[in-house]
Image: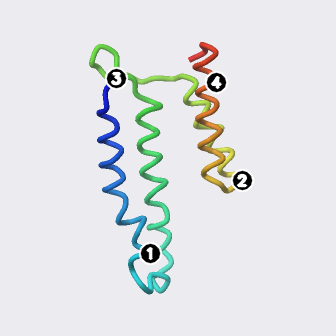
Amino acid sequence: MTTDLVLLAVLMGAVTYPSRALPLLAPGIERLPRWALDYLQLVGPAVLAALAAVSVMVVTTDDQPAFHVGVEWLAVLVSIALMWWRHNLFYGLATAVALVAAARYLGWA
C-alpha cells in the first residue's frame, strides 16, 4: 500500500482552499459582480470533476495509461443525475461511491 495519493489530496486541498475560503476571509464579497461569484462557486466542483474524470477514464497497465470503460462510468452518470434532480452534491457522490463499492464487492468491477 502506498500513500502517494494522500500527498496529492493534501496538495489539491491546499491549492483549492483559497478560492473556497475567499467568502469567509474577504469582507464584502457579496458585492462582487454576479459572474465573479458564479466563477468562485464553480471552482470546487470543477476540480472535483477533473479528478474524477482522470480516475474514471484512465487506467494504468504496464506503466502505460489507457482509456477505461467500467462501472465507474455508470456511477458518474448516476451521480450527475442525482445531483441534478436533488440539487445536492453529497447525495450524488455518496450514491456513486456506494454503487462502485457494491459492484467491486460482488465482483462486477
- Kindly indicate the quadrant of the structure image that contains residue 18: bottom left
Task: List the residue tagged with mark 1.
Answer: 24
Residue at 45% x, 57% y is 44
Alpha carbon of mark 3 to alpha carbon of mark 4: how far? 22 Å
Residue at 36% x, 58% y is 16
The amino acid marked with disc number 2 is Arg
Q: Are marks 2 and 1 in contact (CB under 8 Å)?
A: no
Q: Earlier in the sequence, mark 1 or mark 3?
A: 3
Task: List the residue tagged with mark 4.
Answer: 102
Q: Are marks 3 and 4 in contact (CB under 8 Å)?
A: no
Closest to the camera, between mark 1 and mark 3, is 3
Image quarter in which the C terminus is found: top right
Residue 102: where, in percent of width, then height? 64, 24
Considering depth in this image, is 52 or 100 the residue closer to the camera? 100
Q: Earlier in the sequence, mark 2 or mark 3?
A: 3
The correct choice, above or below, for 70 with respect to 25 in the image is above
Secondary element under disc 2, as helix, strand or loop, is: helix
Closest to the camera, between mark 2 and mark 3, is 3
Considering depth in this image, is 27 or 51 the residue closer to the camera? 27
Alpha carbon of mark 4 to alpha carbon of mark 2: how far? 22 Å
The amino acid marked with disc number 4 is Ala
Secondary element under disc 3, as helix, strand or loop, is: loop
Whether residue 82 sits left or right of residue 30 in the image: it is right
The amino acid marked with disc number 3 is Met
The correct choice, above or below, for 75 with respect to 81 in the image is above
Q: Are marks 4 and 2 in contact (CB under 8 Å)?
A: no
Task: List the residue tagged with mark 2.
Answer: 86
Q: Which mark is residue 1?
A: 3
Q: Which mark is residue 8?
A: none
Residue at 51% x, 23% y is 69
